[in-house]
Image (cartoon, rainbow, N blue to C red):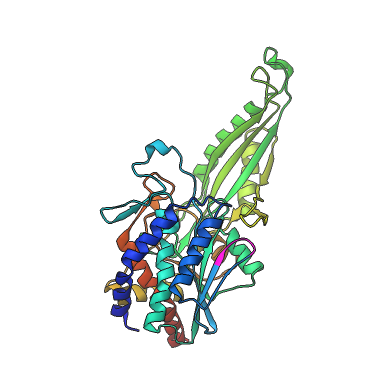
Amino acid sequence: MDHAAIVREAKKHQAAMVKFLRDLVAIQSLSGQEGKVIQRIKQEVKRLGAADKIWIDGLGNLLVKVGKGPRLIAIDAHIDTVGLGNRAEWKHDPFKGKLENGVVWGRGAGDQKGAVPAMVYATRIIKDLGLATGEWSLLLTFTVMEEDCDGLCWQYIVREDKIRPECVVVTDSTNCKILRGQRGRMEIGVTALGRSCHGSMPERGDNAVYKIARIIGEIEKLHKRLKKDKFLGNGTATVSYVDCQTPSRCAVPGAAFIQIDRRLTVGETAQKALAEVRDAVRRAGAEAKVELLKYAEKAYTGLIYPTDKYFPSWCESADAPQVRAAVAAHKALFGKAPPVDRWTFSTNGVSIAGMFGIPCVGFGPAAEEVAHTVNDSVPVEHLVRSAAMYAAFAGTYCGLRTRRS
């Protein structure tokens, strides 16, 4: 494999990748509303003419296959975004994809549409340099609904499309570092019931908000007791939403609800996390229903594919074949060893590795810190580096696995 030629080809496509990314940023694609951006990606893939197969599955994921070899290697990017927040805080128009000082700005530029041009143009590099030798096939997955329900897309790919790659490169923002794990997460609901009455006579009722307030205090204490891990990061718990049911603003609330964002580190399970919250309710001296929440929203295809809001942690060894392959490809392409670390936020790896045990490694453009902010952006140089890595990875991985086995 001529790694210098791969880098030269990636640089040759820089302007085209920037133009394509600006087109993608201009198309709003909230979770469940990704149809137009999927079609734009499909159009670009077809225009480049390097793919052997292109199709859209029932959930709306776009899948692109390059090569015809028996060993299937996948590279994944989610193409949905979060909303804008306060538009007045944006320095650049979030839908213009402005190029300024070597950086593309806009909603989704970093999180994580920036990986898409790199993946798509990697197909052209593979074709032009004859990198697909017949040993492997590369599957590019442009996936939906990750921001609302990370990993749902891959639950569908594995369970319904019946696709199970040998390993997957997750391209969610790594700042061009190699990442090998992440904490999991789950969404827990707690509902306390009381008895409503007129606010002028509160002693006649039973205020559910007072109960939920005591529970909130215990969740704050629980957070400090959770398991710690030096590599993945500590388990965390925080109240992320509060609501109550009351017939008027002059009445005692008869029900109150909180949602807990629970981040799971190594060894923490859904059962353990639910038990800890039930114990917090007990410590609060209250009665309340504790439940794992569910996701059942409509995809842009019209399909509803429900799941529990439980997204397991995962962590790969530094010596895992896909991690070693990513490090080796980086060294060969760029002449230096990359940092190897882990994500702070959550990715589709929760399903790929966490649920299904499919080996994963992370490499993608843009820093985690710009995700979901008004500074959403990606350096142009990251597009070039990522395109080269994606073109080189499958061959490097299969070569290392063959030599080792």
Left or right of residue 256, residue 142 in this image? left
The x, y position of residue 263, in whole percent, is 52, 50
Residue at point 74%, 17% (across, down): 204
In the rendered image, residue 15, in percent from the top left (x then y), is placed at 32, 64
Q: Is residue 236 left or right of residue 297?
A: left
- The residue depicted at 42 percent of the width and 60 percent of the height is 342
- As drawn, 259 above or below 28: above
Where does residue 89 sit, x and y in percent of width and height?
A: 38, 38
* Image-based side of 343 in relation to 273, left or right: left
Residue 60 highlighted magenta (yes or no): yes
Residue 196 visible, this orientation: yes
Seen at 40% across and 72% down, the residue is 122
Residue closer to the observer: 303 or 4: 303
Asked if residue 165 is among those painted magenta in the image, a careful observer would answer: no
60 up-or-down from 263: above or below:
below
Residue 350 in the image: x percent, y percent?
55, 60
Q: Quadrant of the N terminus?
A: bottom left
| Residue 320 visible somewhere in the drawing | no
Q: Name which quarter of the figure residue 311 lies in.
A: bottom right
Q: Which residues are magenta?
A: 58-62
**Magenta segment, prevailing SS (helix, strand or loop):** loop
Which is nearer the eye, 279 or 347?
A: 347
How many marks the image carries: the answer is 0
Q: Is residue 313 above or below residue 124?
A: above
Horizontal arrangement in the rendering, residue 113 relative to residue 144 (left or right): left
Please, which residue is most extreme toward the top here? 200
Q: Who is closer to the viewer here, 118 or 328?
A: 118
